[in-house]
Image (cartoon, grey):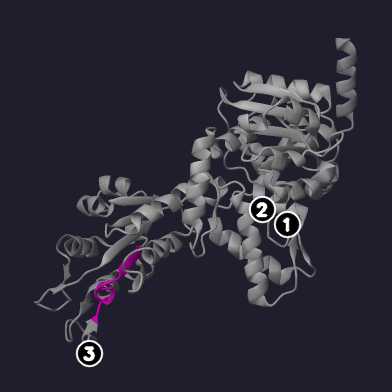
Amino acid sequence: MHQILVVEDESVIRVALRRLLERNGYAVSEAGSVQDAEKDHDLTTFDLVISDLRLPGAPGTDLIKKAGDVPVLIMTSYASLRSAVDSMRMGAVDYIAKPFDHADMISAVERIIADHPTARAVEAREEGSRAAAGQGMPGIIGNCQAMSVLFEHIEKVAPTDSTVLVLGETGTGKELVARSVHQRSQRADKTLVSVNCAAIPDTLIESELFGYEKGAFTGANASRMGLIEAADGGTLFLDEIGELPMEAQARLLRFIQEGEIRRIGSVHSRKVNVRLICATHRNLQSLAAEGQFRQDLYYRINVLRLSLPPLRARGKDILHLAEQLLEHQIERLGKGPMRLSPRAIQAITTYQWPGNVRELEHAIERAVILSPGEEIDNEALGIDLELVNINRLRGQQGMSAQDKPATSGIGPEPQEDLSLEDYFQRFVLEHQDSMSETELAQKLGVSRKCLWERRQRFGIPRNKSGGSRRKSGAAQSK
């Protein structure tokens, strides 16, 4: 059972949080201040520390250093968002705003504990492996568990000559992984040839990969070496191999099996010594079962697999990566000092980033160019923070009945084809008779001012009878 320490000076909140966590299978200890926590408990024995930011005596952030490797989740009010951001920069694993939804708290706890294994010896070993593996990984930034495992696997895979298959969504950095494998291999002083199979027309892919002899086809006025031959002695990286035509797949299979190629129009084969790294965002096993990818080729390239996590699953890495990209873009574009505003940081850490690291990089570049001052806001990033919050609410409502917290009480499951604007209007219209403006704003994750502005934009007048109806209902119940 996971051990959690709750540090909160308000006994009502502390007891309510303890009961919530215990109902969800956690063992909970309590403290009313940093001094009490340090005096009454061995902080290193816990899997997670949840602390209020403002405590009598010393602030909750003092626990970050005192807890060592144990992750610390900071609770703060909306008015202290800047302090929450500073807490994360000091080493807090995350922050959650009060008043928080029960489902949000449990979700945060589950995620943090999953990203930080409970065994101290295992965590220490992984930290050591992360530090060793992370050195000299050009362009790859990450400290989350999934990236630590990736770095460790790269170190093991790189010295071999075995074929590597890199899996990950578009924009996660598969080519950077391929470069890291090459740079740590015995072929590091040789050529790395990168080929995007999706960017070459089907009619040209074979001649590009295998080369051709003079007169092999119309327009072949001279012999030309193929990309595989150009990588002789080094490494060939085939990105998006799932887009390779079936004819080219057959020729590639022979190259892998025999270690030789034959130029188009030639009768002679040539021996080549090439280490192959492939990458794809597609499920090759499913494609092979459907006959869209050669099954024998799949088995040949699926020797050593490296999996890249999507950006949305990388926790604190997202903010760290954003700050590194910001520094890079400032230097590249010759800008002065710039920083991310609290709302920009909140947007970066809550947005889902379907385009992964590439989308984040482009958003940071755009923000650096468009921001007039030193502070970058979420609008310069192209992220509507209110719509992100509404989208998260939709995600909570989309859970199955058995997974949905009993405390949500938000109403029927939304239709999948509703836009966020449509969903906002529907939610307000369906619940304004039973909720106050404050409750509506809290459920939607926006301020009352934002709720009022969106009412004006969408032409939804405030139903003043709703509040009185709730009051009369309450009076009748008494």
Instruction: Estimate how packed mark 2 is, as few (under 14), some (14 to 19) or many (20 or more) residues with alpha carbons within 10 Å.
Output: many
- Residue tagged by mark 2? 348
Q: Quadrant of the N terminus?
A: top right
Q: Report the amino acid beneath label 3.
A: Asn
Disc nearer the start of the sequence (3/2): 3
Residue identified by numbered label 1: 378
Disc 3, disc 1: CB below 8 Å?
no
Residue 111 in sight in this render: yes
Residue in the image at 36% along x and 53% along y: 156
In this rendering, would 35 be left or right of 20?
right
Q: Residue at x 68, y 33 (%)?
A: 49
Say which residue label 3 marks. Answer: 221
Residue 77 pos. (x, y %): 82, 39
Label 3 residue SS: loop
Tell me where residue 232 sits by quadrant: bottom left
Question: Which region of the structure is painted magenta?
Answer: 225-238
Residue 248 found in image quarter: bottom left
Where is residue 311? Give x, y as percent: 55, 51
Q: Earlier in the sequence, mark 1 or mark 2?
A: 2
Q: Is residue 304 placed above or below 199 in the rendered structure?
A: above
Q: Nearer the viewer, mark 3 or mark 2?
A: 2
Please state which of residues 119 and 278 is positioned toward the viewer in this rendering: 119
